[in-house]
Amino acid sequence: MKSTLINTTLGMLALGLMASGAQADWDRGGHAYKPAFQQSQAYGQQIDTRQDRQAARILAAKRAGRLSRYEFRELMHEQHRIRAMEQHFRADGFINAREFMRIERALDLASRTIKAETHDRQARSAYGRPSSFNQAG
């Protein structure tokens, strides 16, 4: 009787360990979530690439003097908010299609804002004097 109870207990313990091991493997690219994991990685790469390009555009405009200090700060805050949104969506380990589309819309808006701010002819002033680029004529 005792050996049957021990064998049953050990069998249930082994079954529980195998089940928890399979569950732990799902979020690391295991068989159950592999396509979703790969898609999430592709989404993440696309988002990171766009954010890097936008940050480079902002810095280039700053160096060229096409952004005021305030405009530069606001554009960088917008990039920070998008990164925070991405981190929030990645908290569960995945970025699904709906979350990806929300980030893409935010990046589209940020791109339009960068273009508007860099082409609005409000150049950074040097030494307290307005830039000659700002003056009409």
Image (cartoon, helix red, strand yellow):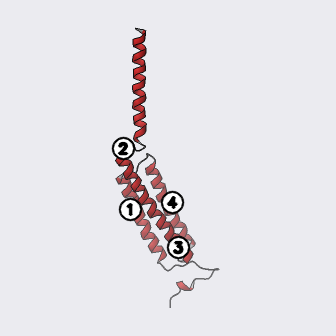
Is mark 3 in CB contact (under 8 Å) with mark 4? no
Q: How far apart are marks 2 and 3 (CA)?
A: 40 Å
Residue, disc 4: 80
The mark nearer the N terminus, 2 or 1, is 2
Q: Alpha-carbon neighbours of circle 4 within 10 Å: few (<14), some, or many (≥20)? A: few
In the image, which disc is placed on residue 105?
1
Report the front residue among 5 and 69.
5
How far is mark 2 from mark 1, CA to CA? Answer: 26 Å
Q: Nearer the viewer, mark 1 or mark 3?
A: 3
What is the CA distance from the residue labelled 1 to the residue labelled 3? 23 Å
**Residue at image point 38% right, 62% down:** 105
Q: Most extreme residue toward the right, as rendered?
A: 127
The answer to whether residue 71 shows anywhere in this view is no
Estimate the x, y position of residue 40 in percent, counting from the top left.
39, 52
Question: Dot 2: within a 10 Å radius of its alpha carbon, few (fewer than 14), some, or many (20 or more) residues?
Answer: some
Which quadrant does the N terminus fall into? top left
Q: Which residue is drawn at 41% across and 66% down?
A: 109
| N-term mark: 4 or 1 | 4
The amino acid type of the residue labelled 1 equals Arg
Disc 3 secondary structure class: helix
What x and y, as percent, mark residue 120? 47, 78
Point out the frontmost of discs 2 and 1: 2
